[in-house]
Image (spheres, rainbow, N blue to C red):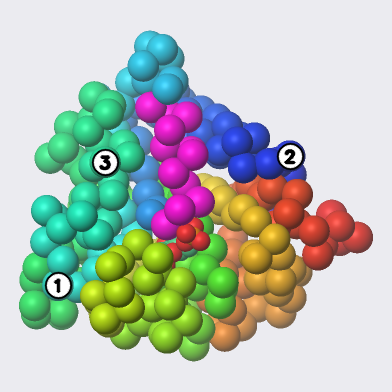
Amino acid sequence: MKILKAKDYSDLSRKAANLISAQILMKPHCVLGLATGSTPIGTYKQLVDAYNQGDLDFSEVTTVNLDEYKGLPKENDQSYYYFMNDHLFSKVNIDKSRTFLPDGTEEDSDKACRQYNDIIHSLGGVDLQLLGLGHNGHIGFNEPGTAFEKETHCVTLSERTIKANMRFFVSENDVPRQAYTMGIKTIMSAHKIVVVVSGADKADIVKEAFFGPVTPQVPASILQLHNDVTVVADEAALSKCTELI
Ligand code: GLP
């Protein structure tokens, strides 16, 4: 596991975007695994800037997102599709028919998850997977206690995740209680993984996830066993592991 120390959030965003740009330049028809949450927003902005400057071409790129709320259609401004479209897809020359997220409107969870697994398998897997990190160590929506061997599955969100994500909704009651997410097995199958983490409020979980024991209680800890993970974190997020890096 490589730790890239960034000075602050904008430095972190630039470093993460550079890793993704390098992937696209090396393999223009790559499959990118993408993430939502507030942390990757700066990374997407950097990618859009690079595209606008003529340095990046998304025309052959395919994307698969980590997760989607169950029950939210694409048009809902809190859906992850809406987020991706707003921050990236509508701003670059990506072919929208090659941007995939789990289908939040599919009520049959087994069907939604099976379809999404089939899409990922038919693409031949993910070249580079971008991840954020939840305060409880979740990646995608894989909450503490999730079995490591799962592929795409339906999850019931923890109270902590509902509270953390409430800031994007009008009220806590509006936050969906369930979501479809790539499983840990799917995430671990990516050739390359880039994790972005920012802020002092993530310092404890950074130490626990990347320097503590590997346990399903801290889903991100499994990343210690992947052979190509780069954690791009700012000084605040790394403040509790200065003696370890
Ligand atoms: C949500 C997403 C995760 C994301 C996490 C952290 O729960 N499902 O994929 O990593 O939020 O978000 P943030 O970057 O806003 O802290």
Which secondary structure is most common in the magenta stretch?
A: helix
Earlier-in-chain disc, 2 versus 3: 2
Answer yes or no: is residue 213 visible.
yes
Secondary structure of residue under mark 1: loop
Instruction: Decide if residue 171 is on the left or right side of residue 134.
Output: left
Residue 243 found in image quarter: bottom right
Instruction: Decide if residue 128 is on the left or right side of residue 229.
Output: left
Q: Position of residue 134 (x, y in %)?
A: 52, 68
> Mark 2 and 3 residues: CB-CB less than 8 Å, in contact?
no
Question: What residue is drawn where x is 47% and y is 81%?
Answer: 160
The residue singled out by tag 1 in the image is 71
Question: Which of the labelled discs sits on residue 86, or is there none?
Answer: 3
Question: What residue is drawn where x is 42% and y is 22%?
Answer: 49
The residue singled out by tag 2 in the image is 7
Question: Which of the labelled discs sits on residue 164, or is there none?
Answer: none
Instruction: Decide if residue 5 is on the left or right side of residue 94.
Output: right
Secondary structure of residue under mark 2: loop
Magenta residue check for 44? yes
| Residue at the front extreme of this rendering | 170
Split into 4 quadrants, where in the image is the C terminus? bottom right
Secondary structure of residue under mark 3: helix
Residue type indicated by callout 1 = Gly
